[in-house]
Image: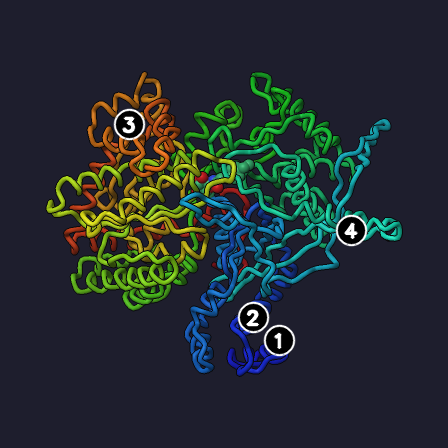
Amino acid sequence: MTKLPSLRESILQHLRYSFGKDPEHAILEDWRMAVSYAVRDRITDAWINATHRTYDTGAKRVYYLSMEFLIGRLLEDGIVNLELVDEARAVLAEFGKDYQAVLADEPDAALGNGGLGRLAACFLESLSTLGCPAHGYGIRYEHGLFRQSFVDGRQVEMPEHWLEQRHAWEFERPEVRYRVGFGGHVDTRGETVRWYPAEEVEAEAFDTPVVGWKGRWANTLRLWSGRAIHPFDLDRFNHGDYAGAAQPEALARTISRVLYPDDTTEQGKELRLKQEYFLTCAALRDILRRFNNQFGDLRKLPAKVAIQLNDTHPAIAGPELVRVLHDERGLPFDDALEIAQGCLSYTNHTLLPEALEAWDESLFGRLLPRHIQLIDRIDATHAARNPSRQQSMRADHQVKMGQLSFVMAHKVNGVSALHTDLMKSTVFSELHRLHPDRIVNQTNGVTPRRWLLGCNPRLASLITESIGEAWVDDLDQLTRLEPNVQDAAWLDRYAQVKRDNKVDLANWMARHHGVHVDPDMLFDVQIKRLHEYKRQHLNILETIALWSEIRDNPEAGWTPRLKLFAGKAAPGYFFAKDIIRLINDAAAVINADPVTAPYLKVAFLPNYNVSLAERLVPAADLSEQISTAGKEASGTGNMKFALNGAPTVGTLDGANVEIREHVGAENFFLFGMTAEEVMERRHVDGHAWRAIEADPRLRRALDLIRDGRFSPQDPGRYHGITGNLEGPDYFLVCSDFTDYWRAQREVDAAFADRSRWSRMAAWNTARSGWFSSDRTIRGYMADIWNAQSLIGA
Ligand code: 26W
């Protein structure tokens, strides 16, 4: 292996020879690319060594199939994991370049909607940190999640163009292409069944290395891009049909053109199903090619290959693997089924009925005529083996992907203890009864490299100074901070870290959004996708009630608070878009009120993404995790806030339950009904009205909204929202309001006592080590994949 020159040398060499620039003439993007290439060189060494080591040891490989990888930026992640922060900053400073400005020049790779996509990205980084041989397989969307801006307070979506700028982190693999078929017909001759697709596209691979802590290992994220087999139709061109001539290429690229922006409602769109099969078919081809090169005997597949389905979106992998093993490789059906089950495992990320994929059988059958036959045979086999079974994956003329995934997997997991229990007692109750040892829990986690060391260097260095740096890949070590939490001087330094982060954020908000806030206010933050079950509307209701209360009595010693929101709504989710507009309209009125201005500010920052989260989480005082109990499968933002010293105001939902268990009930502001109480309350007639009648604050806040106080020029603007809350209120906003208000006033009191607050915040940091995605991945490796670390981690 060649000895790399110093980082400084590498950067200057790339500036010159990769971008043809000398330092005097280089633009910011040139510097960003040169530093990226210099860092990439170092990652590539670890990457190639890891590949060789995996081959040499014949180790089992993990394959993580996901329609989403919400990566964000990669330069800082590479620099942090290779411990090059100070060196990189020094080289850039030598040439008068600001390190943060160079980092900020990189566009986010927004190849995901929210929690599911970001979890996949954290998991890949932890797999590399643990030295577990793994590939991520996804789609190289040309356009990631839309860019959000506000016009008159309303969300406006614009296409996202991450590939328009130079991108340093992918390697095109023109030699890795697979044909993916759609439609057509199936020909059955005796035992042999052949599928003849009507249309085919090619999937071309683009590889991105994913480096782990200290650069000890690096795995591959392989993203597929659609290509036409015959990109240019010369004949049509010669007949002057220029558009037609380019059509084959345009059609093929459509398949990887854009990410579907829905994160809870399956639209049942044909293109979405084509994307899901495109990803899965190419991935399985690639997996089997690699396996054949090394092992050959297909019966060994489960011993060498673990395939994780990130929700049902790649669930077609089950029938596809059976098709290849049975139709193409000639294995008996039952053997093919058994081998597939031995390889496959499935993670469920939501119980929301509208998010569970169920494809219309005619659409499915038209696009994948052989697969629906195999699904029927899989279903029949399962029914025959489980005579007491009631439910079928093929009921209601649909293909129910949750049922199919469960039956095709040897292990199924939920993403928090509560969620896994609810899977057993609700959506998968019958299958759990038939297969009582198949469902296991793997509570989510987040990578401490990006979500503590990278985004909060002040806190990271205070921690390292206090307990050494081992915590970075052994986060349970944070508990060794306990003695420090009892030390008032250390707590002052801890509080100073938070304040300095808040000053940075306040300056950034002033510069980039014209929002001016006092950094000593309580920074109360709710950042996540917009959805009724996440109850951003409960938060703004409480905010409006607080505003009214302060106006009534400004001198009552209020704790100054900044209500900070950020998050996107799916373009077709109009109720969620109305909530965004209400928050912006309320902010305009509240922020303009001189009476309350010293005590309350509201801001909704546009275009929430991974990079904005990295800026907001370290500066937050309070983490809003207020979903209706039983609805948020886990949450991962809640873990990031706790690690960065922001106590939670939240319900007993998802991983909030486990966060409260770890940090201590005394360091968590609990409110609201439990999941059981929620199910009972639903059956109470007029449950919303009863709550409204019982709480004048709630009554007044709803009246202000309904009467157009925040939309005087359009008084009826929010009748949809008030009508829902005073009516069905399915997510029990009104029924949880009074207790939420109570909890928030406790927050006020606690925050007013600075040393008490700092202690609560520090306990959150010290006791959140369990929420590292390293711990989560160790669980998957042991309980689901039976995979080993090749670096003794
Ligand atoms: C078919 C449309 C669609 C797209 C994405 C339906 C559902 C999804 C995802 C499953 C939604 C999602 O991101 N779920 C979130 O997953 C996180 C990671 O496990 C959890 O922490 C969140 O609680 C869960 O809402």
CB atoms at circles 2 and 1 under 8 Å apart?
Answer: yes
Compared to 643, does 263 lie above or below?
above
585 with respect to 65 (left or right):
left
| Residue 492 falls in image quadrant | bottom left
Query: Is any atom of residue 613 visible in this view?
Result: yes
Give the distance between the C-alpha atoms of the residues marked 2 and 1, in whole angstroms: 8 Å
Q: Which residue is mark 3?
A: 735
Q: Which residue is mark 1?
A: 19
Mark 4: which secondary structure? helix
Mark 1: which secondary structure? loop
The dot on residue 246 is 4
Amino acid under label 1? Phe
Instruction: Pick whichever of labels 4 and 2 is earlier in the sequence.
Output: 2
User: x and y percent of residue 557 in the render?
Assistant: 12, 47
Amino acid under label 4? Ala
Give the distance between the C-alpha atoms of the residues marked 3 and 1, in whole angstroms: 61 Å
User: x and y percent of residue 693 in the render?
Assistant: 22, 23
User: x and y percent of residue 19 in the render?
Assistant: 62, 75
Query: Is any atom of residue 1 visible in this view?
Result: no
Pick the residue in front: 598 or 494: 598
Dot 4, crowdedness within 10 Å: few (<14), some or many (≥20)? Answer: some
Give the distance between the C-alpha atoms of the residues marked 4 and 2, in whole angstroms: 32 Å
Give the distance between the C-alpha atoms of the residues marked 3 and 2, in whole angstroms: 53 Å
Amino acid under label 3? Ser
| Scheme of image coloration | rainbow
375 with respect to 43 (left or right):
right
CB atoms at circles 4 and 1 under 8 Å apart?
Answer: no
Question: For the residue with label 3, is its CB less than 8 Å from the closest atom of ligand 1?
Answer: no
Q: Where is the N terminus found, in terms of image quarters?
A: bottom right
Q: Which residue is mark 2?
A: 33
Select label 3 or label 4 by which is in front. 4
